[in-house]
Amino acid sequence: MPELPEVECVRRSLARLVEGRRVSSVRVNRAGVIRGSGSDAALLVGDVVSRVLRHGKQLAIVGESGGVVSVHLGMSGQLCATGNAGDALTQRTASRIGSMKAKPEAFPAHTHVVWRLESGLVVRFTDPRRFGGLWTFASEAALVAERWSRLGPDALWIGPAALGRGLSGTRRCLKAALLDQRLVAGLGNIYVDELLFGAGLHPLSRADRLPGDRLPSLVRRMRTLLRGAIERGGSSLRDYVDADNRAGQQQTRHRVYGRAGERCKRRGCRARIESDQIAGRTTCWCPSCQRL
DNA sequence: CACCACCCCTGGACGC
DNA sequence: TGCGTCCAGGGGTGGT
């Protein structure tokens, strides 16, 4: 569920809280979520956080001494900051999430990693479904070489030419191509469906047959969609919240995603939104506005 | 190369 | 009420 806008909202909220702060300790409740060295040093203990970066749906917390913790939220991952454990904010978070171990130092269920900062801030990585995880690297160069180089250009920055090159090089349909993170990084099921609706493109239309003169407007639309979603704090369908525990509002703007069988929202269009499995994902589109 | 099934995993919705 | 079943989807893998 976290796609580019949600991950960017987490990045911004987290960066505000941790940049320039020193990590005093880390507690790992479930070592399996960490790939690479799970040592204290690799998890930035003793280090000062210099920046929080994002590429596509992935985050990276960079320490001043060079170490990097890359965070992927997967489907259900969260990075949430609170004051010290047990304070009012933590209690609110716990009751929001629902379950809390009956211990004095209690965290919501599925809290896999907990960082404490010298400022007193506590940052928790929680991920019930464990599709996400942490990857540690010795340097930003290693992060890029080993992980981020496999991703295409970020969806917020890719230009028409690069997107055109990616799309023209595959015989897959647009839906499958836009979901492919090697081609463009950051789009997921929700925003691909919304983008294709906005652009009037059928999800099954061939990626390599998209006329080149439609690329600039497709890129503009993609940026507008993603930036608008970021401004509204992202889409909160189940339990997505940013590092400040704030939910987003973009879900109220979805025009096709999750609306199968309902009327198309475009003025004057009476068609009902269709849905089917495309590229292994439930895909929603308007059969009238998006023709093959 | 492209597509498929299957896997990771839990929680929520729904039917009986 | 409680249990079984299905679904959600980011990403990886291995087979056709």
Image: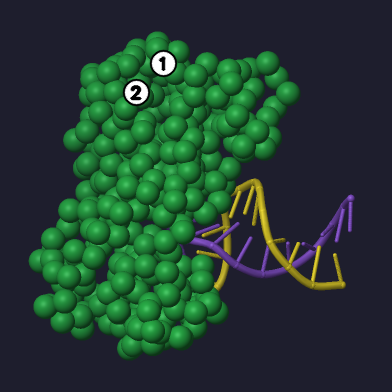
Chain colours: A green, B yellow, C purple
Q: Is residue A198 above or below residue A6?
A: below
Q: Nearer the viewer, residue A34 or A115?
A: A115
Residue at screen point 32% across, 44% down: A8
Amino acid type at mark 1: Leu
C-alpha gap between disc 2 and disc 1: 8 Å
Q: Which mark is residue A46?
A: none
Amino acid type at mark 2: Val
Looking at the image, residue A199 sits to the left or right of residue A83; the answer is left
Q: Are discs 2 and 1 both within one chain?
A: yes
Task: Tell me the element at label 2.
Answer: helix
**Which image quarter holds the C terminus of chain A?**
bottom left
Q: Looking at the picture, how far across and down is residue B15, in whole percent? A: 79, 72
Q: Which mark is residue A18?
A: 2
Looking at the image, residue A117 sits to the left or right of residue A258; the answer is left
Looking at the image, residue A63 sits to the left or right of residue B5; the answer is left
Q: Quadrant of residue A51?
A: top left
Q: Which residue is mark 1?
A: A117
Do we see residue A69 in this rendering? Answer: no
Q: Quadrant of residue A195?
A: bottom left
Residue at screen point 52% across, 16% down: A84
Q: Which chain does tag 1 point to?
A: A
Q: Quadrant of residue A14?
A: top left
Q: Looking at the picture, how far across and down is residue A174, in whole percent? A: 30, 75
Q: Looking at the picture, how far across and down is residue A260, in whole percent? A: 53, 76
Q: Nearer the viewer, residue C7 or A120?
A: A120
Q: Which chain does tag 2 point to?
A: A
View extreme (front): residue = A268
Q: Is residue A260 above or below residue A243?
A: below
Given contact means CB atoms under 8 Å apart, are the residues at marks 2 and 1 in contact? yes
Task: Tell me the element at label 1.
Answer: strand
